[in-house]
Image: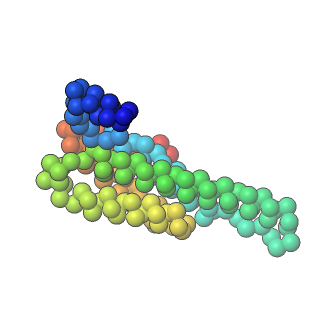
Amino acid sequence: MLKQAIAKIKNLFPAPEVHAHCDGPCGVYDPSSARVAAEAVVSMTKKLMDLEVPAAGDKAGMIAYNNTFSRYVAIKEEQAQITKDELLILWTDYFKPVHLEQYPDLHDTFWKAAKLCSACKVEVSIEHANELMDAVQKIHQMFWATKNRDITWYKAS
């Protein structure tokens, strides 16, 4: 009986149809958050590669090394995931079919950037970390061009 009453009310007072381009239609998009996270990936990758392994038998040194190594890896992986999340939001929520006309390689660019985020999580590769930064820079340029704005690319580090 309650379900019937609710159905009648819905029929008498239907909710208007709404449209939103994302979960929260704020309209605020900016690739800078992806850049900052990608820069952290590069930084942590460099730190990992520069980390000195202690001498054999140096228990305290090995404990400190393992602690630092695991922290750097955790940060690198977290930031790679943040980069991926931020890029996927731009790709799926901001960019529209009209942008494909302007950038026919848009899907391929984002797909490859997302794959680079995964590669940076799986391995310690300065080459892939730098390729990720290049991909984020390309997306930055594409994004701001769609808004007819010339926003300078810069890195915080």
Q: Residue at x 85, y 61 (%)?
A: 60
Direction from residue 46 to residue 63 in the image, left or right: right
Residue 10 on image: x %, y %: 27, 31
**Residue occupying the far front of the picture:** 1
Residue 94 on image: x %, y %: 28, 44
Q: Where, by quadrant of the figure, is residue 48 drawn?
A: bottom right
Direction from residue 148 to residue 28 in the image, left or right: right
Does 22 sit above or below residue 59? above
Quadrant of the image for the N terminus?
Answer: top left
Q: Residue at x 43, y 54 (%)?
A: 84
The residue lying toward the viewer, choosing from 99 and 92, is 92
Q: Residue at x 19, y 38 (%)?
A: 148
Residue 107 on image: x %, y %: 26, 59
Residue 28 on image: x %, y %: 33, 34
Does 67 sit above or below residue 1? below
Q: Where, by quadrant of the figure, is residue 17 drawn?
A: top left
The residue lying toward the viewer, choosing from 63 and 6, is 6
Does 135 sit above or below residue 23? below
